[in-house]
Every structure is written in C-alpha cells, then in structure tokens.
Amino acid sequence: MKALEIADALEQRIAERQLTPGSPVPSTRAIARRWKVSTVTAAHALRLLKERGKVKAVPRSGTVVAGSLLSTERIVSAAIEVADHEGLEAVSLRGVSAKLGAPVMSLYRHVRNKEELLALMADAVFGEVPLPRASKGWRATLEAAARAEWRLMRRHPWLARLSAMNRPQPMENAIRFTDFVLQALEATTLREAEKLELHLVLHGFVQGLAVNLELEEHARSESGVSDEEHVDRQAQAFASLAASGRFPAFTRMSKGLGAFDLDLDRLFERGLTMLLDGLGHRLR
C-alpha cells in the first residue's frame, strides 16, 4: 500500500510539472529516505510508475520522466492508425501499447478494455469532420449529412462495423451528428419516432454500402487480386448461370447490360437520390 501511495505522489508531481519529461526521478535510496520505507518498497513504487508509462529507464541516465506521457487521446489516435493501416482485427491493447512504446498495463489507467477503446475510436472519428452548414430545406441538409458520413467511412472503412444500430453507444460526436439530421426534419410533419426512423434508415443506407469498402480492402490484401481481376475470373460462371434458363429475369438483364462498372460512389449517389425521392413523396 505504501508503494502505491509513493507512486501516486510522484505521479502528482509529474502532472503538476514539478518533474518534467526527461528529468530524473528520485532514486530508490532517495525515495526510501524521503518516505522512510525500505529500498524494496521504493523500487516497487518506481515499477508502478513504469507500468503506468510515467517514467522510463534510460541507459547511463537512470529512471527519468517519460518524454511523452500517455493520454486517452494518444491511445485512441494510435488505435485508429492501427485500424486504418492493418484493419480492425489488428487493434488490441497490447498492439497499441507496443506502437506507443508503453507497458500494456499503463493503458488500463485510461481505457478499461478493448470494447471501450473501440467506442472511443468511433466517437473520435465521428468528430473528425466538421458538420456541413445547415442548408435551406430538409433535402439539401440530409444530402450534405449523408455525404459527410460516406466520406468519413471511406477514410476509415472499419467504422461501419462500429456503428451498429441495435447496440448504440452514447457517443457525444455521434449524437451531435444525429442532432444535425433531426434538426433538418423539425420543419416537416413527421412524428418524432418517424424522424428517428428516417435518421436510422439514412445511416443504415450509408453503413450498408460502407461495409463493402472494408470487404474490398480485406479481399485485396488477402488474395492479391484486384476487383477487376476477380470479376473477370467469375465472368464465365455468371454467363453459364444466365444461359441456364433457370433465371429468366437475370438472363434478360445480362443480355441487355452491356459494359457495367460497379462504382460504389456512383451507387451511393443513386441510392441517396432514390431514398430522398421516396421521403419527398411521403411528405407530400
């Protein structure tokens, strides 16, 4: 218990900048004299500070205050970088601690577990892009909101998996986004429940398409085959299905299709137009 009290006291001095990054911390003997404890207890206190990421051992310099102290923001930022470059599966507290060069136990002072880390990542990302300025009319505002969310998920494809509607998280930046959409609907005749449903439908549309962004990235990295090469390899199998006569509508579509290039951005715009056209009809 005494070691914990000593570690807390030294950490307080670091927080108050009485001990600055790179400066030496009291030695084991100095701590033992100052707090009238054994050198074993003093050494234990220093180990606790190392586990928290507050101090580090430097060759020929001894134990010094860590040059870059841990914070929740740094941990979340490092986790986002890992997810962007290696995928969501690569995110773990151990992996993030290795990236930060800090003991894994030191992260637990800021983040309780991986579930909380993922929620903090999603909230941080939702706060990256400033919300577009509210436009005149509900349609222009909803278009701007949907496009902002689509760009966000294009930049962070893993975000779609952290935006489940059936298990919502009370994230401030996500609620800010929801509030922006709901404000655009205040002048309509929709009931409150209908406004929320519309927001969820709009988010679900963006999320549903965005899931394919991560799937594409994963498939390319795992197989080394581009989307175009994959389609070319499957072309004969699709042609055989169309020629089988068992799927008449699919056969007619295939014959009249011609050259077709699946573009998710174009599909997003087409789907958004259809969705908002339907809402316009509903409001009229």
Image (cartoon, rainbow, N blue to C red):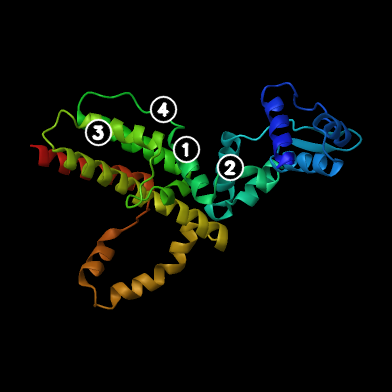
Q: Nearer the viewer, mark 2 or mark 3?
A: 3
The answer to whether 232 appears left or right of 93 in the picture is left
Q: Earlier in the sequence, mark 1 or mark 2?
A: 2
Kind of element beneath mark 2: helix
Q: Earlier in the sequence, mark 3 or mark 4?
A: 4
Gap in angstroms between the C-alphas marked 1 and 2: 11 Å
| Amino acid on which the number 3 mark rests in the picture | Leu
Gap in angstroms between the C-alphas marked 3 and 4: 17 Å
Query: Which residue is labeled 2 in the image?
Result: 81
Residue 198 image point, x, y percent: 22, 42
Gap in angstroms between the C-alphas marked 4 and 2: 20 Å
Q: Nearer the viewer, residue 89 or 166?
A: 166
Q: Tell me the number on the disc at residue 125.
A: 1
Kind of element beneath mark 3: helix
Q: Quadrant of residue 22?
A: top right
Q: Tell me the number on the disc at residue 130.
A: 4
**Picture layout, residue 238 above or below residue 144:** below
Query: Which residue is labeled 3 in the image?
Result: 182
Gap in angstroms between the C-alphas marked 2 and 3: 31 Å
Q: Is residue 224 visible to us here?
A: no
